[in-house]
Image (cartoon, rainbow, N blue to C red):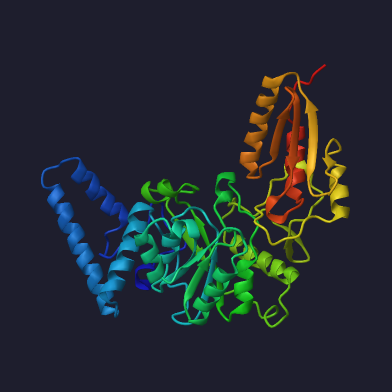
C-alpha cells in the first residue's frame, strides 16, 4: 500500500487523490464514470462496470504479489475503496508505521469514521478502543471488532479492565489506536477537548512507539450515520508525525501529575500536525502538565472542558478566587455545589429563562440542575457530577448565565 502513496507530493493539487489500484485511475476518475453511468449514456454503464472490475482485479493482483492473503485483500481493499472514493482520502508520504513491534497511534477525533480513515494509512491492522455502546449494538459489529482485536471501553473514564486489555494488545506487538479527547463532544464546538490520561498511562506502561496523527476534512460530525453514509464535501487529509520521545518519563513512578504532564505532551504533538487555523485543544498547562485549573482569562470568554472523572475537585482556595468573578452565586453548605436564585416576573418568564440557559448548557456540553418553585422562584445549581464537586466548568457556565437578561419581579 505504501507504493500507492510514495510518490504523492506534500502539496497535492486540488482534488488530487491517491490512486485506488489501477494506474492513473483516481477517485475523481471513478466519480466521472459513476456520473456517466447514472446519466444513462449509452454504453457507459457497461464500461463503468468493466473498469471497476479490471481495476479491482489489478489491485488484488498487486496486493497478492506483496504476500497478502484473501482476508487482507478483502479487508484492506474494502477500507481503501470506501475512504478514497467516498471521503477522497489522501496522505502525504509512505507507510507511517514501523513494519513490526507495538505501536500506539494517537489522533484527534473528527467523526465516527475516523478508524477507517486512519486504517487506510497502513497495511498493519489497527486495534481500537471502541465504546461499549458501539461494541454491543449488533452481533456482527461485535464479531468484526473481535476479529480486529478491538477493546470495548465504558465512557465513565474509570474502565481499568479496558486499559489492561489495551496494554495487553501492545505487549502482543499490535497497533493500538486511541483518541485522547475520549469522545466527539468537541466536534460541534469546533475545537479539540482536553485530553484524558488513559493514553498517557498506556504510553508509559508499554514500550510501544507512540506516533501522533491529525485528520482534517471529512464529515466533521458527532452523528453516527452521516459520518459513514454521506460523502465528504472536503477531502480527508491525514498527517502522521515522528515517534514521540518519552525516554525522560518512562521508568518513573506513575502518578496523577505525571500522567497529566504526559497527556499534555501527547496532545501538543497532535496539535503540531494541525494546519494553520485548525481546531486547538482547550488545555490549560502548568509546568508541562494538563489540569482543569484556572487562568487569568475572564470566565465568560472561556469554554467548558470535557470532564469524565479522574481529576480532583477544585481546592477551597481556588473556589474562593473564582467566586469573586461570579459574586451573585453561593456555595451549598457542603461546598460541593454552586447555586444562584432569581425571583422572576412570572412562571412563563422562568420557563423562557430556562430555555436560554439550556442553549448555553448544550453549547458548552455542561448541564446544570434547574428548579422553578412557587410560580416565580428560579434556582440554577451547578456541580460537576463526574468528580462529585466543583470544577472550573461550573464557574464558566455561571459567568455565561450571568450575562442572560431576565425580567425580575418588581
Task: Give the side of residue 40 with respect to residue 375, left or right.
Answer: left
Task: Give the side of residue 7 with respect to residue 342, left or right.
Answer: left
55 and 210: which is toward the camera = 210
Q: Residue 111: x and y, percent?
A: 48, 53
Task: Give the side of residue 332 with respect to residue 218, left or right.
Answer: right
Q: Is residue 254 above or below residue 136?
A: below
120 and 332: which is toward the camera = 332
Residue placed furthest toward the front: 374
Q: Residue 246: x and y, percent?
A: 65, 77
Q: Residue 50: x and y, percent?
A: 15, 57
Instruction: Give me the residue at 83% from left, 16% from top.
Output: 410
Q: Quadrant of the N terminus?
A: bottom left
Task: Give the side of residue 56 with respect to residue 354, left or right.
Answer: left
Residue placed furthest toward the top: 410
Quarter holding residue 23: bottom left
Q: Residue 66: x and y, percent?
A: 29, 79
For the image shown, how many numbered marks are present on the structure?
0
Quarter holding residue 338: top right
382 and 234: which is toward the camera = 382
Q: Is residue 293 above or below residue 64?
A: above
Amino acid at each position: 500500500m505504501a507504493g500507492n502513496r510514495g510518490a504523492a507530493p506534500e502539496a497535492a493539487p486540488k482534488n488530487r487523490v491517491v490512486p485506488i489500484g489501477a494506474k492513473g485511475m483516481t477517485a475523481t476518475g471513478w466519480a466521472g464514470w459513476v456520473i456517466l453511468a447514472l446519466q444513462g449514456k449509452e454504453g457507459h454503464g457497461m464500461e463503468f462496470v468493466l473498469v471497476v472490475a479490471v481495476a479491482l482485479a489489478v489491485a488484488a493482483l498487486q496486493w497478492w504479489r506483496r504476500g497478502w492473503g484473501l482476508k487482507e485483500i478483502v479487508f484492506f481493499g474494502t477500507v481503501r475503496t470506501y475512504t478514497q472514493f467516498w471521503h477522497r482520502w489522501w496522505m502525504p508520504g509512505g507507510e507511517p508505521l514501523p513494519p513490526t513491534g507495538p505501536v500506539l497511534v494517537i489522533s484527534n477525533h473528527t467523526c465516527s469514521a475516523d478508524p477507517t480513515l486512519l486504517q487506510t494509512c497502513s497495511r498493519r491492522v489497527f486495534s481500537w478502543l471502541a465504546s461499549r455502546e458501539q461494541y454491543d449494538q449488533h452481533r456482527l459489529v461485535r464479531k468484526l471488532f473481535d476479529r480486529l482485536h478491538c477493546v470495548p471501553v465504558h465512557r465513565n473514564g474509570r474502565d481499568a479492565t479496558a486499559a489492561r486489555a489495551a496494554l495487553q494488545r501492545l505487549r502482543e506487538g499490535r497497533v493500538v489506536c486511541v483518541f485522547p479527547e475520549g469522545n466527539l463532544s468537541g466536534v460541534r464546538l469546533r475545537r479539540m477537548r482536553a485530553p484524558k490520561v488513559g493514553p498517557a498511562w498506556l504510553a508509559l506502561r508499554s514500550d510501544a512507539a507512540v506516533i501522533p496523527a491529525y485528520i482534517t476534512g471529512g464529515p466533521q460530525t458527532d452523528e453516527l450515520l452521516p459520518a459513514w453514509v454521506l460523502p465528504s464535501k472536503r477531502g480527508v487529509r491525514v498527517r502522521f508525525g515522528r515517534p514521540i520521545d518519552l525516554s525522560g518519563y518512562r521508568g518513573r513512578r506513575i502518578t496523577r501529575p505525571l500522567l497529566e504532564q504526559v497527556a499534555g505532551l501527547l496532545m501538543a504533538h497532535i496539535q503540531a500536525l494541525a494546519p494553520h487555523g485548525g481546531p486547538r485543544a482547550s488545555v490549560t498547562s502548568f509546568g508541562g502538565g494538563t489540569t482543569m485549573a484556572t487562568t487569568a482569562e475572564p470566565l465568560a470568554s472561556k469554554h467548558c472542558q470535557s470532564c469524565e472523572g479522574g481529576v480532583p475537585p477544585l481546592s477551597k482556595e481556588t473556589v474562593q478566587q473564582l467566586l469573586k468573578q461570579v459574586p451573585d452565586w453561593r456555595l451549598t453548605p457542603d461546598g460541593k455545589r454552586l447555586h444562584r436564585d432569581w425571583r422572576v416576573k412570572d412562571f412563563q418568564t422562568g420557563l423562557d429563562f430556562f430555555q436560554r440557559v439550556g442553549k448555553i448548557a448544550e453549547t458548552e456540553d455542561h448541564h446544570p440542575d434547574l428548579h422553578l418553585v412557587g410560580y416565580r422562584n428560579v434556582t440554577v445549581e451547578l456541580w460537576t457530577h463526574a468528580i462529585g464537586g466543583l470544577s472550573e466548568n461550573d464557574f464558566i457556565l455561571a459567568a455565561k448565565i450571568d450575562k442572560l437578561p431576565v425580567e425580575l419581579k418588581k
